[in-house]
Image: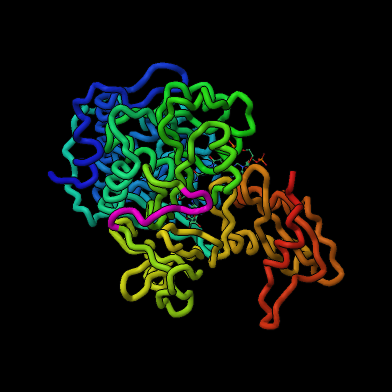
């Protein structure tokens, strides 16, 4: 039966004996073996009672097996919902409940906590450990290595990726088979991926960048990936000589540049370095070229839209820009309030339309409507301009968002938590320059009259509630927050005041 994504990305490899994943510990997994494993997983998923359109939530370490769960979901028509391993029990509880997931996969260290969440939501629970063992793979061992692929059209849903919002509540972005496939096709062509490539893969596979950009491109082009369980400079340096391409967030590049072992010679037979998820400083771009002779190719995307723009493969990769709209993707700059298009070169909100743009937020019709214009353009919340040569520049954000090491953090979510703490009247959370993560989180609290809140106790109290990477690196106390005449907190003034708080 036709299945848009499976037929394009996976089915062509069912008899491919070539290497798909090179493993850190040595050895590799061939495409055909990977697909046999995925077929067995698809049986376990369907035996658990899931059918096309149901959701499977996964919070597990990066492993070939974890990736095969994605393939298994696509094949069985089940919607794949990967979750950041840093999310706390409270966060996972929300995602499982909101999505109505019928099966949850986690590792045994969190199984007790997740079991309670699963039971509350009448979901099944199975384990999958970092080494690939667990009740899920155990159940798969006796299953057939073939599977009747579920019929899925291009408009059917393939994945939910949760993205936080300015209201503090996470929204499930619904991505269709066509969204993912159209983007993968554009990127393979734009970045010239072929089966000769070897992608150095150190990104997590629970977000768009590491999963859809990196892995869908690998699958569609039939290349192999050096599949590292996590980012670590030693592993990147140790494996670079065997790779031809790498994708990373800016922190990957600044950390590589901080290491004297990262030399021109080491990078000499790489053909492509891609950066995205957060702004790459022009100085990093220049330092990288000076060190290696390579110009990093910066591109721009979003969970809701996959990739929107990219610097060119052959033409000038312009530092400080995110290049041109990808083929088939329309990008315009609009007045943030009215949505009217703005003259070329002026700054406005970036809006995007194309086959890459998601179907909407799960069960949030109103929220979805608010983020689209009547003519179908999605309002990204990024502020930018398009220069005379057609390069898109991102100059800031209309949305109150912090991007730290490539992870999105919505201040509202943390402010709501801080406001609940003993002795806190109100709070503001801001992003300030951080030498490693680009931006780092700072929390500013205002005490209730006569109270002196204990910042250490507050940090301890929020620890179990939100993922570590979202927690303020510093919490400071002010007598009052700066406000404009309308009473709105002036975060710019706070960002200026604390600009050096996390420096060096
Ligand atoms: C880890 N920590 C962080 C971050 N990562 N704090 C702030 N921001 C971060 N990004 C904290 C941990 O909580 C921990 O704190 C300490 O740092 C060490 O944790 P560890 O896991 O060892 O950190 P690491 O391995 O050095 O991780 C840094 C990293 C990682 C490699 C840059 O954050 C990463 O892989 N980032 C990539 C994110 C990504 O894939 N983004 C794509 C989203 P403590 O010691 O206090 O416990 S997709 C997207 O944005 C769109 C679609 C796009 O365009 O791509
Ligand atoms: P996410 O919601 O995690 O998908 O993050 C999407 C956001 O990351 C975008 O709206 C941008 O603000 C930001 N982003 C992604 N790529 C870039 C880039 N190359 N330069 C600047 N910001 C970027």
Residue range in magenta is 318-328
Q: Position of residue 124 (x, y in %)?
A: 38, 43
Q: Write down the quadrant of residue 190 in the picture.
A: top left
Residue 192 in the image: above or below residue 37: below
Picture quadrant where residue 496 is located: bottom right
Image quadrant where one finds the C terminus: top right
| Nearer-the-camera pick, 316 or 25 | 316
Specify whether 119 is left or right of 158.
right
- The residue sitting at 76% across, 53% down in the picture is 500
Foreground of the two, 422 or 194 = 194
What's the residue at 44%, 30% (across, down)?
A: 200
Say if residue 474 shows up in the picture: yes
Toward the right, the furthest residue is: 450
Q: Position of residue 18 (x, y in %)?
A: 27, 22
> In the displayed structure, does residue 362 sit left or right of residue 50?
right
On the image, the x and y values in percent for residue 210 come to: 43, 41
Q: Is 68 drawn above or below residue 33 in the view shown? A: below
The residue located at (44%, 54%) in the rendering is: 162
Name the quadrant containing residue 47: top left
Does residue 326 show up magenta in the picture?
A: yes
């Amino acid at each position: 039966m036709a299945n848009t994504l499976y037929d394009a990305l996976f089915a062509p490899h069912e008899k491919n004996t070539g290497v798909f994943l090179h493993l850190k510990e040595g050895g590799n997994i061939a495409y055909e073996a990977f697909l046999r494993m995925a077929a067995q997983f698809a049986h376990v998923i369907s035996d658990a009672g899931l059918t096309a359109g149901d959701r499977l939530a996964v919070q597990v370490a990066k492993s070939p097996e974890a990736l095969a769960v994605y393939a298994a979901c696509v094949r069985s028509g089940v919607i794949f919902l990967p979750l950041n391993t840093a999310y706390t029990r409270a966060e996972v509880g929300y995602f499982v409940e909101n999505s109505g997931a019928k099966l949850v996969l986690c590792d045994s260290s969190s199984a007790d906590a997740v079991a309670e969440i699963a039971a509350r939501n009448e979901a099944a629970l199975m384990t999958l450990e970092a080494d690939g063992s667990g009740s899920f793979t155990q159940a798969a061992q006796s299953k057939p290595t073939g599977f009747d692929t579920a019929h899925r059209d291009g408009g059917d849903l393939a994945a939910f990726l949760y993205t936080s919002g300015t209201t503090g509540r996470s929204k499930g972005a619904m991505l269709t088979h066509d969204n993912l496939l159209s983007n993968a096709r554009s990127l393979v062509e734009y970045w010239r991926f072929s089966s000769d490539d070897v992608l150095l893969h150190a990104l997590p596979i629970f977000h768009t960048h590491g999963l859809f950009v990196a892995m869908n491109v690998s699958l569609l082009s039939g290349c192999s990936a050096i599949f590292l369980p996590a980012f670590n400079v030693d592993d990147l340096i140790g494996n670079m000589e065997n790779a031809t391409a790498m994708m990373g967030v800016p922190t990957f590049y600044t950390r590589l540049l901080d290491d004297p072992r990262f030399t021109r010679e080491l990078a000499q037979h790489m053909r492509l370095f891609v950066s995205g998820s957060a702004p790459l400083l022009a100085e990093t771009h220049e330092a990288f070229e000076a060190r290696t002779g390579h110009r990093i190719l910066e591109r721009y995307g979003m969970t809701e839209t996959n990739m929107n723009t990219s610097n060119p493969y052959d033409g000038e990769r312009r530092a400080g820009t995110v290049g041109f709209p990808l083929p088939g993707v329309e990008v315009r700059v609009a007045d943030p309030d009215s949505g009217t298009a703005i003259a070329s070169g002026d700054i406005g909100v970036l809006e995007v339309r194309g086959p890459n743009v998601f179907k909407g937020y799960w069960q949030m019709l109103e929220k979805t409507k608010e983020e689209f214009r009547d003519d179908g353009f999605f309002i990204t919340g990024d502020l930018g301009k398009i220069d005379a040569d057609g390069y898109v520049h991102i100059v800031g954000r209309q949305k109150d968002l912090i991007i730290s090491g490539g992870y999105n953090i919505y201040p509202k979510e943390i402010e709501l938590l801080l406001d609940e703490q003993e002795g806190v009247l109100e709070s503001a959370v801001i992003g300030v320059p951080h030498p490693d993560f680009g931006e780092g989180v700072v929390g500013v609290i205002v005490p209730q009259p006569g109270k002196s809140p204990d910042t250490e106790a507050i940090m301890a109290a929020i620890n179990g509630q939100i993922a570590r990477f979202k927690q303020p690196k510093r919490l400071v106390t002010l007598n009052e927050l700066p406000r404009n005449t309308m009473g709105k907190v002036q975060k710019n003034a706070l960002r200026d005041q604390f600009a050096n708080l996390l420096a060096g």
